[in-house]
Image (tube, grey):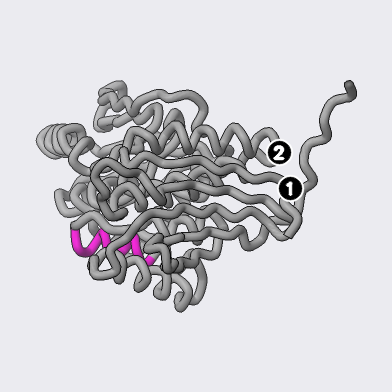
Amino acid sequence: MDEGTSELQTTLGLEEPGILRLHFAGKSASREAGRVLAPTFDAALSQATSEHRSLELRFERLEYFNSSTISALVQFIRAAQRAGVPVTVVYDAKQRWQAMSFEALQRAMRPFETSGGPSISFIEA
Amino acid sequence: MRHLFQIELPLRQDWEAIAPLRQSVTACLKAVFRDHALCEALAMVAGELLENAVKYGARQPGSERGFALTVVGGPGGVEVEVSNPVDPADPGFERLLAEIARIARAPSPQEAYLEAMRRVAISGTPGRLGLARIAHEGGCDVTASLGTDGLLRVRAMTRRLTPVPPTAAPPA
């Protein structure tokens, strides 16, 4: 984590039927991460909803994120849940910081899962 | 306290100054500790404290007085301190003290952090997760004090760090 100065990059992928993948790479340390990420999140959620796809958020190549980014991510997962879109979060548990961050996020989101509602799952890459 | 190492860096009240400082902390700590995950966790701690200082520090046109980062390693652990001028009447100052008190009252740092994230999920508004993240992911106790010099000093001290000797210098 945190070597060099690579900016955050996000890319959308449609490699697999029924899944819209959103890849994160580099570092996300914006002062207003919610505002910066909003166009990407809005586009992803809109496409996933209209094409009846689930969302897969892939963070293995993310090098660092600040708490402003975590806040934006929490809100995005909730928005997807309200829109009825299942979300899978994929992270690299071999990187201790990713394990700490995403295990905490998983625990935080657990109370928001409802039976019959869209699933929120966390997978180690 | 005998210091194993000390890093002191001035901070511009400028968001662009944060990443280089965070990366400097990572590089310095990796020269001291073999546990790179620990170094990255402490750099995250520094980053979150620096972000708070830049966001909420009192603006002083033409002066950066009081904005600083200090990282001190001693036999008991590592302390990261960020100072900034503050207006005690600023509601942000009271919110910071209240958040530190909330974290201290929580059953555990993890519970404090999970509660903060759930507040964000429920309210739909960006929350101040940084201090609770420092407590949980950074493994640090967070305290703050306002000096007679008008500077707010927020400190994060490692809780469970086993003292690790500095890396031995290679033979000459």
Query: Where B97 sits versus A102, above or below?
Result: below
Q: Report the front residue among A35 and B172.
A: B172
Q: Amino acid at mark 1?
A: Leu
Badges 1 and 2, same chain: yes
Q: Please give the range of residues in magenta.
A: B115-124
Q: Which residue is mark 1?
A: B4
Estimate the x, y position of residue A77 in percent, counting from the top left: 26, 49
First along the sequence among labels 1 and 2:
1
Q: Which residue is mark 2?
A: B32
Q: Which chain is indicated by disc 2?
A: B
Circles 1 and 2: CB distance less than 8 Å? yes
Callout 1: SS: loop
Q: Amino acid at mark 2?
A: Val
Q: Which chain is indicated by disc 1?
A: B
Callout 2: SS: helix
Q: Report the front residue among B54 and B47.
A: B54
Q: How would you rate the neighbour count of disc 2 (Cα within 10 Å): few for under 14, some for 14-19, many for 20 or more?
A: some
Can residue B122 be found in the magenta stretch? yes
Closer mark to the observer between disc 1 and disc 2: 1
